[in-house]
Image (cartoon, rainbow, N blue to C red):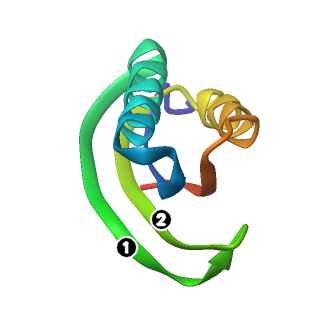
Amino acid sequence: MAKVTATYETMLVFNTKLGEDGVKALVEKFKSLIEANGTIDSIDEWGKRKLAYAIEDETEGYYVLYTFTCKPDFPAELERIVKITDGVLRSLTIVK
Protein backbone atom coordinates (compact mmCIF):
# COMPACT_ATOMS: atom_id res chain seq x y z
CA MET A 1 0.00 0.00 0.00
CA ALA A 2 1.34 3.45 -0.92
CA LYS A 3 2.14 6.07 1.69
CA VAL A 4 -0.53 8.72 1.97
CA THR A 5 1.92 11.47 2.92
CA ALA A 6 5.66 12.04 2.64
CA THR A 7 8.14 14.53 4.06
CA TYR A 8 9.69 17.02 1.64
CA GLU A 9 12.28 19.78 1.75
CA THR A 10 12.04 22.81 -0.51
CA MET A 11 14.88 25.30 -0.78
CA LEU A 12 13.91 28.64 -2.29
CA VAL A 13 16.32 31.43 -3.21
CA PHE A 14 14.65 34.82 -3.42
CA ASN A 15 15.92 37.91 -5.24
CA THR A 16 17.29 40.40 -2.68
CA LYS A 17 16.36 43.32 -4.98
CA LEU A 18 12.79 42.92 -3.69
CA GLY A 19 13.91 44.49 -0.42
CA GLU A 20 13.26 43.17 3.07
CA ASP A 21 9.46 43.57 2.83
CA GLY A 22 9.27 41.89 -0.57
CA VAL A 23 11.29 38.90 0.62
CA LYS A 24 9.20 38.59 3.81
CA ALA A 25 6.02 38.65 1.68
CA LEU A 26 7.32 35.77 -0.47
CA VAL A 27 8.42 33.75 2.59
CA GLU A 28 4.90 34.21 3.99
CA LYS A 29 3.23 33.42 0.65
CA PHE A 30 4.93 30.03 0.37
CA LYS A 31 4.39 29.31 4.09
CA SER A 32 0.64 29.87 3.62
CA LEU A 33 0.58 27.80 0.43
CA ILE A 34 2.30 24.84 2.12
CA GLU A 35 0.08 25.11 5.23
CA ALA A 36 -3.02 25.02 3.01
CA ASN A 37 -1.85 21.75 1.43
CA GLY A 38 0.07 20.01 4.21
CA THR A 39 1.85 20.42 7.53
CA ILE A 40 4.98 22.54 8.00
CA ASP A 41 7.63 20.85 10.14
CA SER A 42 10.07 23.77 10.05
CA ILE A 43 11.05 26.94 8.21
CA ASP A 44 14.76 27.66 8.33
CA GLU A 45 15.63 31.14 7.05
CA TRP A 46 19.32 31.10 6.14
CA GLY A 47 19.14 34.75 5.14
CA LYS A 48 21.22 36.61 2.59
CA ARG A 49 24.11 34.66 1.09
CA LYS A 50 26.46 35.06 -1.83
CA LEU A 51 25.52 32.92 -4.82
CA ALA A 52 28.10 30.55 -6.30
CA TYR A 53 27.46 32.20 -9.68
CA ALA A 54 25.34 35.10 -10.90
CA ILE A 55 21.67 34.32 -11.60
CA GLU A 56 19.78 36.97 -13.57
CA ASP A 57 22.74 39.33 -12.87
CA GLU A 58 22.27 38.84 -9.11
CA THR A 59 25.21 37.85 -6.89
CA GLU A 60 23.23 37.48 -3.63
CA GLY A 61 20.08 35.59 -2.73
CA TYR A 62 17.87 35.12 0.32
CA TYR A 63 17.74 31.42 1.20
CA VAL A 64 14.77 29.74 2.92
CA LEU A 65 14.42 26.01 3.63
CA TYR A 66 10.90 24.66 4.15
CA THR A 67 10.45 21.16 5.61
CA PHE A 68 6.90 19.86 5.31
CA THR A 69 4.67 16.80 5.12
CA CYS A 70 2.02 16.52 2.41
CA LYS A 71 0.35 14.27 -0.15
CA PRO A 72 2.60 13.29 -3.11
CA ASP A 73 0.68 15.40 -5.65
CA PHE A 74 1.36 18.77 -3.95
CA PRO A 75 5.12 19.24 -4.69
CA ALA A 76 4.44 19.40 -8.45
CA GLU A 77 1.86 22.14 -7.86
CA LEU A 78 4.29 23.96 -5.54
CA GLU A 79 6.99 23.87 -8.23
CA ARG A 80 4.50 25.20 -10.80
CA ILE A 81 3.66 28.17 -8.56
CA VAL A 82 7.35 28.78 -7.79
CA LYS A 83 8.13 28.95 -11.53
CA ILE A 84 5.47 31.63 -12.19
CA THR A 85 6.33 33.74 -9.11
CA ASP A 86 8.50 36.79 -9.74
CA GLY A 87 11.38 37.14 -7.31
CA VAL A 88 12.31 33.46 -7.03
CA LEU A 89 15.82 32.92 -8.42
CA ARG A 90 16.09 29.15 -7.78
CA SER A 91 14.18 26.34 -6.14
CA LEU A 92 14.65 22.67 -5.36
CA THR A 93 12.23 20.19 -3.78
CA ILE A 94 13.32 16.78 -2.58
CA VAL A 95 11.69 13.87 -0.73
CA LYS A 96 13.39 13.60 2.64
In the rendering, at what x and y percent does residue 35 appear? 38, 19
Please, what secondary structure does the residue beneath circle 1 have?
strand
For the residue pair 48 and 32, the one nearer the viewer reads as 48
What residue do we see at 29% from left, 60% from top?
Answer: 47
What residue do we see at 46% from left, 25% from top?
Answer: 29
For the residue carrying disc 1, how many other residues have a C-alpha within 10 Å: few (<14), some (14-19), or many (20+)?
few
Q: Are marks 2 and 1 in contact (CB under 8 Å)?
A: yes
**Quadrant location of the N terminus?**
top right
For the residue carrying disc 2, how many other residues have a C-alpha within 10 Å: few (<14), some (14-19), or many (20+)?
many
> In the rendered structure, which amino acid carries the disc numbered 1?
Arg
Whether 8 is drawn above or below 46: the answer is above
Residue matched to label 1: 49
> In the rendered structure, which amino acid carries the disc numbered 2?
Gly
Please, what secondary structure does the residue beneath circle 2 have?
strand
Q: Is residue 85 left or right of residue 37?
A: right
Whether 60 is drawn above or below 19: the answer is below
On the question of residue 15 being in view, the answer is no
Q: Which mark is residue 94?
A: none
Q: Which mark is residue 61?
A: 2
Whether 65 is drawn above or below 7: the answer is below
Q: Is residue 2 left or right of residue 73?
A: left
On the question of residue 32 being in view, the answer is yes
Q: CA distance from mark 2 to mark 1?
A: 6 Å
Q: Is residue 46 left or right of residue 8?
A: left
In the rendering, at what x and y percent does residue 76 appear? 70, 36
Which residue sits furthest top?
Answer: 36
Q: Quadrant of residue 41?
A: top left
- Which tag, 2 or 1, sits closer to the chain's start? 1
For the residue pair 95 and 78, the one nearer the viewer reads as 78
What residue do we see at 49% from left, 21% from top?
Answer: 33
